[in-house]
Amino acid sequence: SGSVPTLLRPGLISPHDLRRVVPELKLASHLRHDDEAANPISTSTVSGSTEQAAKPFLSPGLMSKHYSPRAILESWAADGAHRVQEILNSGAAVGWLRWGHQTILRHSRLKIVDMPSNSAEYGSCLYAKLHDLDHANVTHIVLDLPPAEEHWLAIRDRLRRASSVWSEVLPTG
């Protein structure tokens, strides 16, 4: 609905691949990583409020919240081991979707899932892994975010919508 083709919601075909066919393709402002850099996100609670019904969405799936697990999903940059340990220390059961590292942490209330480093494989198993952790009756899921690179855009978009907490900065202390 404009003169410049604009990607409103990322999917299986990456923006890079789409630009091979539509070179002038732009990313909607809510998808551009440079917007995130200009307005850095620290720990924030993602709104679960109802959407305004006054204006229709330009694309299906643009609501701020989609599927999210019953457990509290916290998405963290890099290694979420510190946050996992904090939650375990509080007495809660934790699921940890790890990505790209081998931090060793063992506990009877901890379920660890190592996620694939390939974005297509990651995307194909993400919801099944979240469902598995819900069925394991964890109360919190800590997820190590994949990189903020264009081929991870669709996955990061879905994670942002599913998360209760989204942080580009790890807690200290």
Image (cartoon, helix red, strand yellow):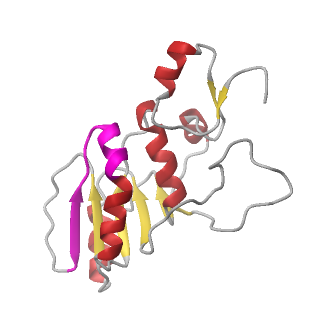
Residue 1 in percent (x, y) is at: 78, 30
Marker count (numbered): 0
Q: Quadrant of the C terminus?
A: bottom left
Image-based side of 70 in relation to 111, left or right: right
In the foreground, 160 or 23: 23
Residue drawn where x is 27% and y is 81% of the image: 89
Outermost residue toward the bottom in this view? 91
Residue drawn where x is 59% and y is 38% of the image: 31
Residue 70 in percent (x, y) is at: 45, 74
Whether 114 is drawn above or below 85: the answer is above
Whether 3 is drawn above or below 53: the answer is above
Image-based side of 170 in relation to 96, left or right: right
Give the quarter of the image for residue 69: bottom left
Residue 123 in percent (x, y) is at: 37, 45
In the foreground, 115 or 13: 13
Give the quarter of the image for residue 106: bottom left
Residue 145 in percent (x, y) is at: 37, 50
Whether 161 is drawn above or below 83: the answer is above
Q: Which residues are magenta?
A: 109-125
Residue 121 forms part of the magenta stretch = yes
Residue 119 forms part of the magenta stretch = yes
Residue drawn where x is 79% and y is 60% of the image: 52
Give the quarter of the image for residue 171: bottom left
Whether 93 is drawn above or below 29: the answer is below
Residue drawn where x is 46% and y is 21% of the image: 17
